[in-house]
Amino acid sequence: MAKRLIAAAALSVACSLCAAQPADLSEQTLYEFMLGEIAVQRGDLPLSELIGAYAGEIGQTQFLPSSYIKYGVDYDGNGHVDLRHSVPDVLASTANLLKVNGWKAGAPFGEGSENFQVMREWNRSETYRKTMVLFAEKLRE
């Protein structure tokens, strides 16, 4: 009963937030919230951890709930996709997102490459993608 009350209160807050946004963003925000609730219902996230960043991103690689549901992989085999605490799940889910969207292993990934465009599915911000490229290049050194 208490969980339903908390979920109802959270939905009310989400609806209020949606009302303050342009219509196209409102629908997406509500959709992402509902997908986050699905992650809670299937046991991937405790309700107390349904906390996201500014745009609702969840976990170490900041997946929106829609990506969490679509690309999440239970790589550690514990029965749940855990993008907050399970490094194997985080890495496998991120690799899955990239592979499904056309990542070419071994191909260039810098700005202007096909792989750079594939990263857009992960994060549309060009600055974010350029930062990922910079970190990857530093790790290669």
Image (cartoon, rainbow, N blue to C red):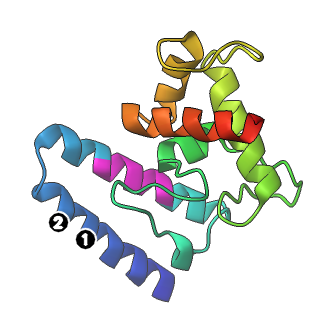
Residue 108 among magenta residues: no
Q: Name the residue under label 2.
A: 16
Where on the picture, by quarter, is residue 87?
Answer: bottom right
Q: In terms of secondary structure, where does tag 2 sit?
A: helix
- Tell me what residue is drawn at x 46 percent, y 69 percent: 51
What count of labels does the image hold?
Answer: 2
CB under 8 Å between callouts 1 and 2?
Answer: yes
- Quadrant where the C terminus sits is top right
Q: Which of 58 and 2 is in front in this view?
A: 58
Q: For mark 2, does the 10 Å Cα neighbourhood hold few (<14), some (14 to 19), or many (20 or more) residues?
A: few
Residue name at image x 46 percent, y 27 percent: 120
The location of residue 59, given as percent across then percent down, is 58, 59
Q: Name the residue under label 1.
A: 12
In this rendering, the answer to whether 6 lies above or below 74 is below
Q: What stretch is highlighted in magenta?
A: 29-36
- Nearer to the camera, 111 or 117: 111
Residue drawn at the location 49% of the way across and 43% of the way down? 66
Q: In this view, does 103 lie to the left or right of 118?
A: right
Q: Position of residue 5 (x, y in %)?
A: 39, 83
133 with respect to 111 (left or right): right
